[in-house]
Image (tube, rainbow, N blue to C red):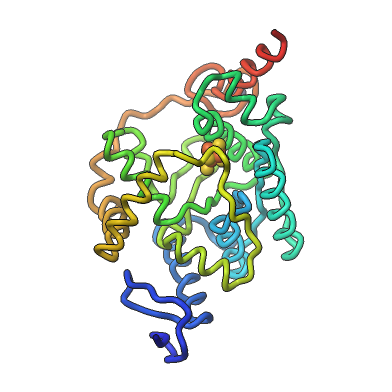
């Protein structure tokens, strides 16, 4: 197997692109895909500081690495969810990565904001764990961006993640999430940062290969609550399709983005207010995160 660009021995084969690459040319290919994502969706400019949400996993650290290498102004944001050893280890990976590259890492902790980590928040709210966690992550990400002056948040979602979310949303015809599924979400309020996904053109296998070739030390274990998640079943189904027909995931996601997404966009504007307790953006009077914090406090008091 030879590199498509230089003819040297290839280290990775990409059936979807009908290509194989040596290590330097694969890294170049990876950076070009990220650059194309940023350009196509006008994600950010070199003058804008970007807050990169890092979990300690391969995708988010690969994203941070490529943005640093390209010369963007970045800081990392680690959200400490208080999920047992998983949080301790993933935080250590992010701290080591930031220190090795001389980058700033902002740490936000769920426990500091609401008095307990995600496992206890779940018990207090009786929401599914990932729902309480997702709500907390969205809130803390935006709040950190606004408080620290970052107009844009970049997350490490890759092509496989996005295709799996799309698959789930299509299975249940979730109209609202379908209208919002995009590699770049604009800000609709001065207190809302833009959210972008510069890895959406790259598969999980490609980000894993990039992280490995760049010598990035990431946490391999998944969050313990990820086990049995329906998103994993959806990923497995799409993996089988991809195996039978390379490019299936790409065609599914890109076809949606290019041909179908507009159909789901609705025009009714959502009225956004500022939460009476914390001042962050909400559609009601008090935001869902403050309500969640209140439930935790009440449970602790009882
Ligand atoms: S939502 Fe659920 Fe993740 Fe939160 S509780 Fe773990 S698996 S970390 S992406
Ligand atoms: Zn609030």
**Residue at 44 percent of width and 76 percent of height:** 12
Which quarter shows the C terminus? Answer: top right
Count of numbered marks: 0
Q: Residue furthest bottom?
A: 7
Q: Nearer the viewer, residue 275 or 242?
A: 242
Residue 204 image-quadrant placement: bottom left
Q: Nearer the viewer, residue 272 or 112?
A: 112
Coordinates of residue 46 in the picture (x, y in percent): 57, 63
Q: Is residue 2 visible?
A: yes
Residue 216 image-quadrant placement: bottom right
**Residue at 49 percent of width and 27 percent of height:** 128
State whether residue 269 is above or below residue 64: above
Which quarter shows the N terminus? Answer: bottom left
State whether residue 230 is above or below residue 35: above
Q: Is residue 190 visible?
A: no
Image quadrant of ligand 2 equals top right
State whether residue 214 is above or below residue 90: below
Q: Nearer the viewer, residue 269 or 231?
A: 231
Q: Nearer the viewer, residue 43 or 59?
A: 59
Coordinates of residue 85 in the picture (x, y in percent): 69, 43
**Residue at 45 percent of width and 83 percent of height:** 10
Q: In the shown orientation, is residue 23 left or right of residue 120?
A: left
State whether residue 104 is above or below residue 232: below
Coordinates of residue 66 in the picture (x, y in percent): 57, 66
Q: Residue furthest top?
A: 302
**Residue at 64 percent of width and 25 percent of height:** 120
Coordinates of residue 18 in the picture (x, y in percent): 31, 76
């Amino acid at each position: 197997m030879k590199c498509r660009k230089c003819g040297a021995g290839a280290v990775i084969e990409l059936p979807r692109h009908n290509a194989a690459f040596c290590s330097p040319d694969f890294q170049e290919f990876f950076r070009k895909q990220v650059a194309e994502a940023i350009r196509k969706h006008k994600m950010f400019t070199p003058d804008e500081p970007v807050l990169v949400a890092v979990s300690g996993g391969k995708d988010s650290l690969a994203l941070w690495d490529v943005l640093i290498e390209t010369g963007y102004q970045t800081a990392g944001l680690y959200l400490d969810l208080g999920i047992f050893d998983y949080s301790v280890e993933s935080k250590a990976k992010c701290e080591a990565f930031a220190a090795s590259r001389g980058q700033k890492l902002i740490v936000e902790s769920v426990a500091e904001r609401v008095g307990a980590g995600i496992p206890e928040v779940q018990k207090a709210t009786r929401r599914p764990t990932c729902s309480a966690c997702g709500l907390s992550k969205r809130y803390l990400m935006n709040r950190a961006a606004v408080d620290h002056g970052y107009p844009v948040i970049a997350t490490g979602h890759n092509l496989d993640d996005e295709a799996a979310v799309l698959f789930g949303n299509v299975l249940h015809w979730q109209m609202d999430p379908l209208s919002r599924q995009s590699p770049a979400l604009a800000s609709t309020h001065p207190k809302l940062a833009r959210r972008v996904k510069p890895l959406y053109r790259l598969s999980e296998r490609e980000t894993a290969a990039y992280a490995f070739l760049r010598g990035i030390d990431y946490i391999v274990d998944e969050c313990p609550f990820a086990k049995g998640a329906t998103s994993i079943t959806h990923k497995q189904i799409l993996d089988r399709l991809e195996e039978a027909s390379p490019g299936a995931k790409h065609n599914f996601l890109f076809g949606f983005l290019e041909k179908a997404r507009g159909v789901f966009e609705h025009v009714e504007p959502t009225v956004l207010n500022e939460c009476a307790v914390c001042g962050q953006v909400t559609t009601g009077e008090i935001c869902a995160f403050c309500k969640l914090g209140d439930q935790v406090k009440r449970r602790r008091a009882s």
